[in-house]
Image (spheres, grey):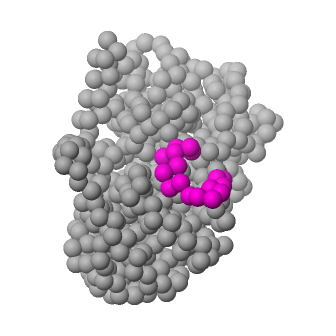
Amino acid sequence: MVRIAALIRLYHTVKFLRFKQIYYRLFYRLRSRWRRVTGFSYPFTVTSDVTPITLAPSIQSVALFQNRRADFLNIVHDFGNGIDWNIATYGKLWTYNLTYFDYLHHGDASKEEGMALIYDFVKQMPLLKDALEPFPIALRGINWIKFLTYHHIDDRAINDALYAQYHILMDNLEYHLLGNHLLENGFSLLFGGIYFQDAALRQKASEILYAELDEQILDDGAHFELSPMYHQIMLFRLLECINLLQHNPVDASLQKFLETKASLMLGWLRHMTFQDGTIPLFNDSTNNIAPSSRELFDYAERLNVHVNSRPLHESGYRKFSKGRYECIVDVGSIGARYIAGHAHADTFGFELHVNNRPFIVDTGISTYEANAQRMTERATVAHNTVSINNESQSELWGAFRVAERAEIISLREDADTVTATHNGYEKRYGVLHQREFIGGDKQLTLIDTIVSDKEYHAVARVHFHPDITDEEIAQSLRFEPACEYTVREYRYAPEFNLHVKAKVVEVLFTQKLKTVIAI
């Protein structure tokens, strides 16, 4: 029975994939096996031809590598006498970040130490594992080219090693994943194509960027994976490419296309940024990974890229701004359908800021490892919405998998009210969940309705920021019909590998619950 259930779950995961994803997963797997048999290996140096490029100043990185100490994702590691580029102690995400080389662009990074790190990496290239996967190659390529450009370095050994990595990237483009991974491949290929004067790299970059940006940037400007953090990252990379094309003109049409998409993304980000400059931590979002919204707006202004602000619509997010408070709510389905790895079971979740400070928050994420913490942080019980039988609205599994998922089946809205219904529990229990958000001048009201022929126990949860006291919670909440609620601790995750104790309110109800949050 367990095996049958696992096969059914796999079917409901795979059915959302595109044929291209399945084809390339099989192709790359079979090719890998054949290459092991034949002893195939990539060259780690390829003769290159580089013409110096020009770049305007960009945004500094928060990652730091100084005096053999790597400091990012809230983990500090001292490599002592030798750098292990394959280190697996802290999980794959930390290893990836080590090999991205973002820290070359920290304000305290030096040219000399940056060169030493690159030389060490090049020396160890034949021994590398995760670092030679396409995603870290793509990000590292941009970071090395920027570093070499800003410091006016022309080094044959580094250039030839980097050119070899671009050949590996071209042979392993992430068509099996698509989404932000393939888009990152395209951004990097543009840098590589211009830096190395390689027409094939430039052609593939244009092909990817035109196709993927048209699909991945929605009509309201959102990146279609619906993570505000990944939106910031993709916008940053887009601005980097605009910087490249503005100062090294090779394709005016592509430059104009990228500027148009960046304008839309800036508009969406302006809607989704609170007055204090932070973003809601919806889906896989956390702080101190992407450049801040303020940094992105400033960078765009320096590049003369203007904001094109359209109303929030296709992304499924809506915003109430009522003087003393701002509330952003999620009334959309999981996106993107065929690459939902960064999605959470958080339909009808919301974040609320009062007087420019966070009041009700999303719980955030602390890890990408396939463990219990990852499962908890993606689950419905970790979000400001309603769960039935403590189960998630959408079927999450692994670290980045979603099988059956909640879909929005109705949506009505006006200036101060949004009412939506999702079917995440319909197949299991015959239950629909409707939530109405009403944005009043001095209060936010939620009306939850469990639509079912049977009576089920539902739990509504509200997660408060760690700075919010028990007294503030008691003063702000009122439930109708009047009922008792439970206050317990939860672990707020504002950054990777960081937890802060905070309070969550849980309310048990059956058919209908009105929650009034006084402001």
Residue 218, picture quadrant: bottom left
Drawn side of residue 154 relative to residue 518, left or right? left
Decide: is 421 above or below 82. above
Residue at x 52%, y 36% (from the top left corner): 374
- Tell me if 20 is positioned left or right of 408 in this view: left
**Does the rendering let one see residue 312?**
no
Picture quarter containing residue 25? top left
Dominant secondary structure, magenta: loop
Residue at x-position 31% and y-position 17%: 3
Where residue 247 appears, as percent x and y from the top left, is 40, 87
The spot of residue 202 in percent (x, y) is 26, 75
In this image, 167 relative to 444: left or right? left
Q: Quadrant of residue 293?
A: bottom right
Depth check: give the residue in front, 74 or 465.
Answer: 74
The quarter of the picture where the N terminus appears is top left
The residue positioned 37% from the left and 43% from the top of the image is 340
- The stretch of residues the image draws in magenta is 76-93
Residue drawn at x 35%, y 87% as measured from the top left = 51
Task: Say if 102 sits above or below 383 in the image.
Answer: below
